[in-house]
Image: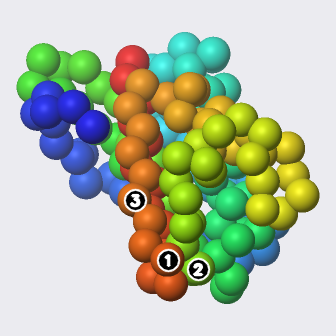
Amino acid sequence: MNGTSFHHSGSDISVCIRQELDIAQARQAAQRLATHVGLSRSQAYRLMTTVSELGYNLFLHARPGGTVTLSVLSRTSGQAGIEVVAEDQGPGIADLDLALLDGYSTNHGLGGGLPGSRRLMDEFCIRSQVGEGTCVVARLWR
């Protein structure tokens, strides 16, 4: 993540991802925040796709799931954005470099979730510890 200063607005929305319906709720929350912040239609779609992909990863890989937290951000310059934090206490990712390659999957999927999310967002950071869990932080600026 870059060193630009910003602050959270305090209007965080957290969704526990335990079942597929929870992913839809997180996506709807992302859509509401995108409208609130004034993201363009294509930016809103990028945000909602990222929330869906990260939510599915929590659902599929991090039993019993994890949490997606959405936050409105503002930079000191006045620029607004949205931060997505997806975190779990699941098995972790043994090889992050491999997991970020297109086509790599440990669950017979297409392997586009993490690398696609990284491309869709303006900022993307992932930390993972085997046996402890994973945390993805992604930001999209207006």
Q: Earlier in the sequence, mark 2 or mark 1?
A: 2
Q: Quadrant of residue 85?
A: bottom left
Q: Quadrant of residue 55?
A: bottom right
Q: Which residue in the structure is indicated by mark 3? A: 127
Q: Which residue in the structure is indicated by mark 1? A: 130
- Kind of residue at disc 1: Val
Other residues around mark 3 within 10 Å, as few (<14) / some (14–19) / many (≥20)? few
Q: Is residue 12 visible?
A: yes
Nearest the viewer among 41 and 105 is 105
- Kind of residue at disc 3: Arg
Q: Are marks 2 and 1 in contact (CB under 8 Å)?
A: yes
Nearest the viewer among 68 and 123 is 123
Residue at 42%, 25% (x, y): give it. Answer: 122
Q: Is residue 130 above or below residue 70?
A: below
Measured as percent of width and height from the top left, residue 74 is found at 22, 32
Q: Is residue 51 visible?
A: no
Q: Are marks 1 and 3 in contact (CB under 8 Å)?
A: no
Q: Earlier in the sequence, mark 2 or mark 3?
A: 2
Q: Considering the numbered disc 2 on the image, is that residue within a helix, a strand or a loop?
A: loop
Q: Is residue 124 above or below residue 84?
A: above
Q: Quadrant of residue 23?
A: bottom right
Give the label on residue 91, or none: 2
Measured as percent of width and height from the top left, residue 20 is found at 81, 66
Other residues around mark 2 within 10 Å, as few (<14) / some (14–19) / many (≥20)? some
